[in-house]
Image (cartoon, grey):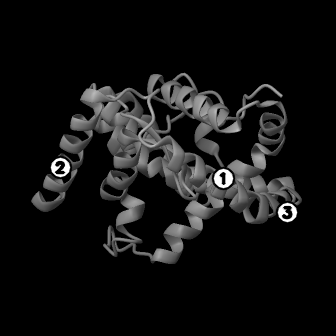
Amino acid sequence: MSLKKIKTILSFVIIISIFSVSSKAAEECFEKVSRSVFKFNLVFDDVILEPVAKGYNKLPNTLKKGTSNFTSNIATLLSIPNSLLQGNFKQVGHASGSFLVNTTVGVLGVLNPAKKLGLNPHKEDVGQTLATYGIGSGCYFVLPLFGPTTVRDSVGLIADTFVDPFAHVTIREKEIFNISGSDLDYYSVKGTTAIDFRSDNLSNFDSLEKNSIDLYASYKSLYLQNRENDIKNSNVDQDDWGNLDN
């Protein structure tokens, strides 16, 4: 990693530290704006994301599972450097071993033989890594399309592209071990991941919408609780938001 990139990440950390001193996750940075963005995201979901997710759910289970395995395998690349930064060397081994086995024996990650070998990598990102260093989450707000976040997690979202090998060989146009990609590769995988997540939670989100007095507040509570579980690694045996009570 170059000195320039290290300085950039350190700048992110300094900024988020300043915000975190005076803000708690339960507080809002600008609630009125966030509620407006939230409404926009709901429209986008109703018009585009949900219909696509419903169509995706009609695909054969084998194809859906293979696609989910493939995107999860690529996401493991982000977990490797973050586990290392967190000092969790056991998880570095699990993530590295899982990616190696699934990419080779598992046909580019379409299959998941690593799980049968007992390799179970946690999903780790820079936001979680910053939390392990004692950096508070900062206030809560909503981003267009990306949805709920906090100051720490939004900074982490940007920093992810500096530490994620997949981002380096695609949107950052670097070559690692003679492997390179394009912006299209990166955003296709991210888009497919979002669709896969939405398709797995169709009934959960429908139930949340029907039973919530304040849907915005419900999403906020759900997001903050889920992120706290991610940081504590208490979601490792569950799919993201897949355990919601209907």
Residue 134's label in the rendered image is none
Q: Amino acid at mark 1?
A: Lys
Label 3 neighbour load within 10 Å: few <14, some 14-19, many 20+: few
Q: Measure how far apart labels 2 and 3 are at the Cα level.
A: 42 Å
- Look at 33% across and 45% down and name the residue there: 81
Between discs 3 and 1, the one toward the N terminus = 1
Q: Please give the residue where the numbered disc 1 appears in the rendered image.
A: 39
Q: Amino acid at mark 2?
A: Ser
- Look at 40% across and 35% down and name the residue there: 139
Relative depth, front residue between 147 and 71: 147
User: Can you give x and y, in whole percent of width and height, for residue 210 in the image?
Assistant: 84, 36
Q: Please give the residue where the numbered disc 2 appears in the rendered image.
A: 11
Q: Secondary structure at mark 1?
A: helix
Q: Count the marks.
A: 3
User: Can you give x and y, in whole percent of width and height, for residue 56 in the image?
Assistant: 81, 61
Q: Amino acid at mark 3?
A: Gly
> Is residue 62 found left or right of 240 in the rendered image?
right
Q: Secondary structure at mark 3?
A: helix
Between discs 1 and 2, the one toward the N terminus = 2
User: Can you give x and y, in whole percent of width and height, for residue 211 in the image?
Assistant: 82, 30
Label 1 neighbour load within 10 Å: few <14, some 14-19, many 20+: some
> Is residue 36 found left or right of 56 in the rendered image?
left
Residue 55's label in the rendered image is 3
Label 2 neighbour load within 10 Å: few <14, some 14-19, many 20+: few
